[in-house]
Image (spheres, rainbow, N blue to C red):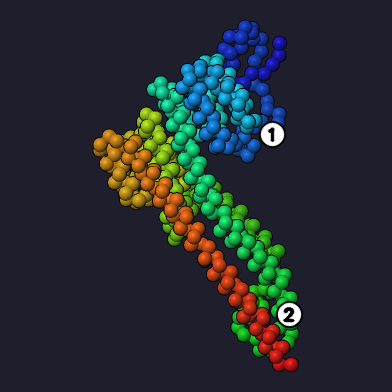
Amino acid sequence: MTGVIDAPNQEIALDTLRDKGFFIISLDLARKESIFELELPFFNKVPIKDIVIFSRQFSVLLSASVPLVRSVQTVARQTRNARLHRILREVADEVEAGAALSSSLERYPHAFSPFFVHMVRSGETTGRLEDVMNYLADQMEKDYDLNQRIKGAMIYPTFIMFGLVVVGFIMMTFVVPKLTETLSESGAELPWTTKLLIAVSGFFATYWILLLISAGVIFGLFKWWTSTETGRFLWDKYKLRVPIFGPLLQRIYVVRFTQSFGTMMTGGVDIPSSLSICADVVGNAYFRAQLLETKKEVSDGNALITVIAREKSMPEMVSQMIAVGEETGRLAEVLDRLTGFYSRELQNMVSNLVHAIEPMIMLLMGGAVGIMVAAILLPMYNLASQF
């Protein structure tokens, strides 16, 4: 017989085939022929919502004393996402062959994050896999809901600002030059607002292609710079100092840190490993560097808040509460309280920001319309009144 088997390494593949009664003559590494089978994030990213559903269903099956392999197979059959369905089938085969569940999940980083894998591993070690999966589902649901609320709140102002930029560019490039052409040919004395508008619209009309190319080049260079280690660190550090949006971003990173760290503490993961995982989860290079430095300090026997208190990147309340939790041995409980507090504060900040942006947009639109009227219509009215 000839066939293909999916396994994390050659030894597990050989053991799996022998357990099924085969005598192996030849075993070689198969080549992936389709680009859709490659481990690329663009094609293989599994939505967080599907992972939440998997965690919830899996914990229910485990609580009903369904064997591990059968639980994974059952969830795989109920999963509508084709990519996750294939992953869970492969995970079930690997676990049936003797691999640990966490090791099998670790092979699919585009579906299961390091945070998720370490939590599962802690559940396997402590014998509390059912509780860990249920807790993971709860925490991932909270994180998913928070991200959706933030995205939903920012859709309207983002759409309006994008529309203003596009409409303004079209007006200045194609519409305004035709309106100001009559004013320029009249030879009448024009106010400074009209002269400024004519100069700007003329520049846009003449060099609009160059402007678009320049904008694309600048955007590409900026993306390249932020993809470098130094550029990403400096940009993420600068974002925290931007008025209005800086405190908002800080709260987002704080919630991610406290929620992830608290979950790892509840799952029994040691502090250095938890800090290393949280450094990747938080999503900010500046915070990541501080958390990795904190991990080094903790490994050397120093207090957990040494770096956090020195750098002052997080609110003072966070460092004080963590210090109390570390001293009293109730760090997980303290982190859970911090997560709840800053989650509510973040929601209020997003809501207030949206309400503040709406009148600002109206003022901006009114100002733009007023300038257009003063620069075009009034000179035209004065010119017509002379006849």
Q: Can residue 318 be seen at all in this image of the molecule?
A: yes
Identify residue type, mark 1: Ile
Q: Earlier in the sequence, mark 2 or mark 1?
A: 1
SS of the residue under disc 2: helix
Task: Place residue 297 in its image quadrant.
Answer: top left
Q: Is residue 140 left or right of residue 161?
A: left
Q: What residue appears at the point 61 percent right and 53 percent down from the top-left corner?
A: 220
Residue toward you, 128 or 31: 128
Q: Residue furthest front?
A: 64
Instruction: Determine whether 306 is above or below 167 in the image.
Output: above
Quickly name the residue at label 1. 35
Q: Find the distance from the CA under tag 2 to the CA under tag 1.
A: 55 Å
Q: Is residue 149 left or right of residue 368?
A: left
Identify residue type, mark 2: Glu
Q: Residues within 10 Å of mark 2 (few under 14, many from 20)?
A: few
Q: What residue appears at the point 30 percent right and 44 percent down from the top-left corner?
A: 321
Residue 55 pos. (x, y %): 51, 30
Residue 371 pos. (x, y %): 60, 76
Q: Can residue 8 be seen at all in this image of the molecule?
A: no
Q: What residue appears at the point 62 percent right and 80 percent down from the top-left corner?
A: 374
Quickly name the residue at label 2. 181
Q: Is residue 18 left or right of residue 355?
A: right
Residue 103 pos. (x, y %): 50, 24
SS of the residue under disc 1: helix
Instruction: Determine whether 51 is above or below 69 in the image.
Output: below
Instruction: Determine whether 272 is above or below 249 in the image.
Output: above
Number of marks present in the image shown: 2
Q: Residues within 10 Å of mark 1 (few under 14, many from 20)?
A: few
Image quadrant holding the N terminus, namely top right
Residue toward you, 175 or 312: 175
